[in-house]
Amino acid sequence: MKKNQIDIVTMGCSKNLVDSERLMRKLSANGYHCVHDAKHPQGEIAVINTCGFIGDAKEESINMILEFAQRKQQGQLGQLYVMGCLSQRYQKELEAEIPEVDKFYGKFNFKQLVSDLGPVEDGGGSFSSARTQHLPTTPHHYAYVKIAEGCDRHCAYCAIPLITGRHVSRPKDDILKEVRDLVADGVKEFQIIEQELTYYGVDIDGQRHIADLIEDIANIEGVKWVRLHYAYPNQFPMDLLDVMARHDNVCNYLDIALQHISDHMLSRMHRHVTKQETMDLVKAIRARVPGIHLRTTLMVGFPGETQADFDELVDFVKWAKFERMGAFAYSEEEGTYSAEHYTDDVPAEVKEQRLAQLMAVQQTISEEVEAQKVGQTLQVIIDRKEGDYYVGRTEYCSPEVDPEVLIRATRQLHVGRFYNVEITDSEEFDLYGHVV
């Protein structure tokens, strides 16, 4: 065990990653050496930031806790702490079931861990970056910026409001200061995230201010790319599209979770939007931001989903031709409306069959979308070097979840720099090219 080293493991989404980064900064300022997602943890202290969104994510978080608890029992770890969404929701149960954990923290009181550990006795703070909000876990050239916490939407299946509470927007000046500080520290690309991005500002004065915020971020000198995540279709702020069309550094990319398309399912899910409204929105987005790449998430197997509902969803995917799409099978979450009022009546094997069929349709669409880029010259930012290739992304690709561009390393390229790349070949989810 390395004295004063803290190994931090983040489970789940990028919003959790931001929380881990903020914790790492505070611990580093107290003299600790923080290592994130180490392949071979060696610290005397470990912190696991958990996810509690759906069944699979909860199981993964619990397995990670148990793995580290075993290391502690074997004398390979001195102290173990757990934070995040899972412990926010199930703290008492976890304390009873996994006593090896020294202390559990929720999603909002994890900063107490810094006080509980106290400063390193034989050393001062080791942190020198200009990133005032968090210590980075991402490559130096991009960062996630969380602009709000919580969600006022109460979709029937979703446990997020039970975990995070009401939507609370960060003050705009605080966000802009963070972006300026990150730019000063070399960050060029910003992933703007929150549980419900289009709701930003409503809790402050009743108005949606996401367009104003993105406009102000785009106007900061040194901001090269801004990418938007986790929008909601109901009452979508159309002025945001004008900002996207007006600013070259606001990526032609929007992550908007639609979940389903049949009116029957949308109503049962409490999505407060109709099929026609959804289709009209997709058409409007594509018309007002030409070339935009849409990412969405869809759900199969929600209680009451008929074969006709699912067929309608497949037809919608074929019509919309989403450039990026993910899907998952419904998982009943205690405390949600659907768990208390509906019967989980779609058999597991049917859910899995529908999920596989939907993703097979999307695979064909993705192949067609990427093939259309062959022959084009696109701006690419380099993320890393792997073997004989540099690996980068276009503005249409968010880190870790979207297709990448592979460039054979016949000349030296620099991580974090932009290059014009001619696309020469494509696969299902990746592109190949060379610098021009």
Image: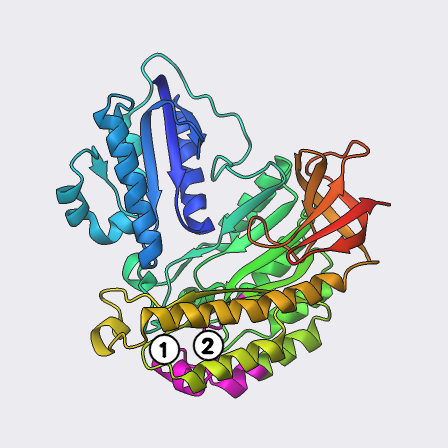
Say few, some or many: other residues with alpha carbon within 10 Å of mark 1 (under 14 / 14 to 19 / 20 or more): many
350 and 59: which one is in front? 350
Q: Quadrant of residue 149?
A: bottom left
Q: Position of residue 365 (x, y in %)?
A: 64, 69
Image point 54% across, 29% down: which residue?
129
- Tell me, yes or no, whether the two marked residues, 1 and 2, touch with CB atoms within 8 Å: yes
107 and 414: which one is in front? 414
Q: Which residue is mark 2?
A: 260
Q: Which residue is mark 1?
A: 269
Mark 1 element type = loop
228 and 350: which one is in front? 350
The residue type indicated by label 1 comes to: Met
Figure coloring: rainbow
Residue 277 in the magenta stretch? The answer is yes
In this picture, which residue range is highlighted in magenta? 256-279
Q: Is residue 315 above or below residue 143?
A: below
- Could you tell me how far apart the alpha carbons at marks 1 and 2 are, in whole angstroms? 9 Å
Residue found at the very far top of the displayed protein: 122
Residue found at the very far right of the displayed protein: 436
Quarter placement of the N terminus: top left
